[in-house]
Amino acid sequence: MYFYGSTGVNKNGNLEIGGVDAVELARQYGTPLYVYDVALMRERARGFKQTFDELNVTAQVAYASKAFSTVAMIQLAEEEGLSLDVVSGGELYTAIVAGFPVERIHFHGNNKSREELEMALDHRIGCIVVDNFTELELLKTLCREKNAFVHILLRITPGIEAHTHDYILTGQEDSKFGFDLQNGQAEKALRIAMECDSFDVLGLHCHIGSQIFETTGFLLAAKKIVEKLEQWKIELSFEAKVLNLGGGFGIRYTKEDEPIQPSQYVREIITEVKHLAEQHSLKMPEIWIEPGRSLVGDAGITLYKVGSSKEVPGVRKYLAVDGGMSDNIRPALYQAKYEAVLANKPLAKANQTVSIAGKCCESGDMLIWDLPLPEAGEEDILAVFCTGAYGYSMANNYNRIPRPAVVFVENGRAALVVKRESYEDLVRLDLPLK
């Protein structure tokens, strides 16, 4: 068993998270249940921020809230001095309700609506990351209508591919995101933005992918961008104040994954950007990064109650739980892999191999294939590790299944931060036929 953060085994022989018995959490709050190790999230945040501070580099570490956005999570990010990356009006609204400082909010997205941009301007958020020419013109129009002034970054695609799943590649030339750096789109966008009195063009943004285990892609992206910035300094008298290299820092889901520490990502990125700036006679820009999964992914554990089982002789044994693709769609969407234990006997010897099936009416609703487990039956509690990113945020009501509750644990205490949906919640917005 691999112990993440404050997980361990208590004197009762049960899995413990943040000093709280996982079996007791399941009893008190029900299952499925998302449980977050707050101490580990704080540790991850500080791991990114402290390296910038130690190296005396001006920076912003923005939590990419698409990974997991709730009022409590946004408030935790604020406590740790992070900035915030939002990608929709809903995420922006959550940040506003949470009381997050608007000057530290960055707004992403490839299809921001008029209403979303108006919300951003009305609340005077810190930065809008402009993604395409349509948005550039719309934002110009809205700024004129509102007599507004806004700081912007231009999102560019540097032509760098990260070593990751095809569906979550975003930095290569063929992408729905950003202005292409190679074919002249980025320069055209920069010229348009620089001519607009309503904009302060802070610099450039790129995001090369997700679940990345090395720094090579980030360093290559920085090299391509800085080379272009040298050209633009000469030709356009433009010098970037900010270089945002995005996120995508990987975590350990299974023993095959070998992530590096947040401090290593930061240290190597800083070293390379400093070198490139000196080499190309540019001022050292502020460095912004956007960790999301790497802040919350391995801090989250989902607890399920074991239900039915089915054995196909000579093929496999299925063990069903009371959740599935309604609370974690990643295995179906990305073929994501996870590790798990029985929370009520985490150290028991595995004497069987089972495949964990969800309860949704889909043959593809499988959470884990071929998981070694001890004998398991109804009422046992299965704990699936590293579900903190894109579990709750991608949860859904397929089969009219209510979404789970969310609990934060820290220093032996548990706090309910999202209530479990009820059946009444499921029909609250429904209207009758007549």
Image (cartoon, rainbow, N blue to C red):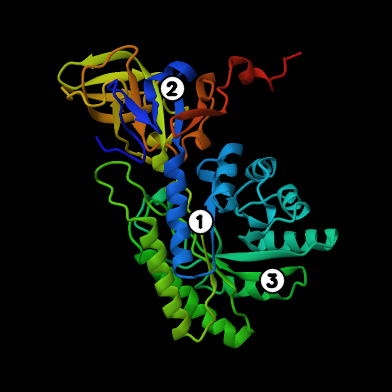
Please name whichever residue, 164 or 199, is drawn nearer the observer in this view of the structure: 199
Residue sitting at x 74%, y 49%: 119
| Cβ–Cβ under 8 Å for marks 3 and 1 | no
Q: Amino acid at mark 2?
A: Leu
Which of disc 1 and disc 3 is earlier in sequence? 3
Q: Secondary structure at mark 2?
A: helix
Amino acid type of the residue tagged 1 in the rendering = Glu
Residue at label 2?
A: 25
Circle nearer the N terminus (2, 3): 2
- Relative image position of residue 216 (x, y in whole percent): 35, 66
What is the C-alpha distance between the residues marked 2 and 3? 52 Å
Secondary structure of residue under mark 1: loop
Residue at x 36% of width, y 48% of height? 251
Name the amino acid type tagged 3. Ala
Q: Quadrant of the N terminus?
A: top left
State the image coordinates of residue 210 (x, y, percent, origin top left). 42, 52
Provide the residue designation for mark 3.
193
Q: Quadrant of the C terminus?
A: top right
Residue 434 placement, left or right of 204: right
Q: CA distance from mark 3 to mark 1?
A: 23 Å
- Which of discs 1 and 2 lies nearer the camera? The answer is 2
Image point (39%, 70%), residue name: 220
Q: Residue 290: which disc? A: 1
| Badge 3 density bin: few <14, some 14–19, many ≥20, Cα 10 Å | many
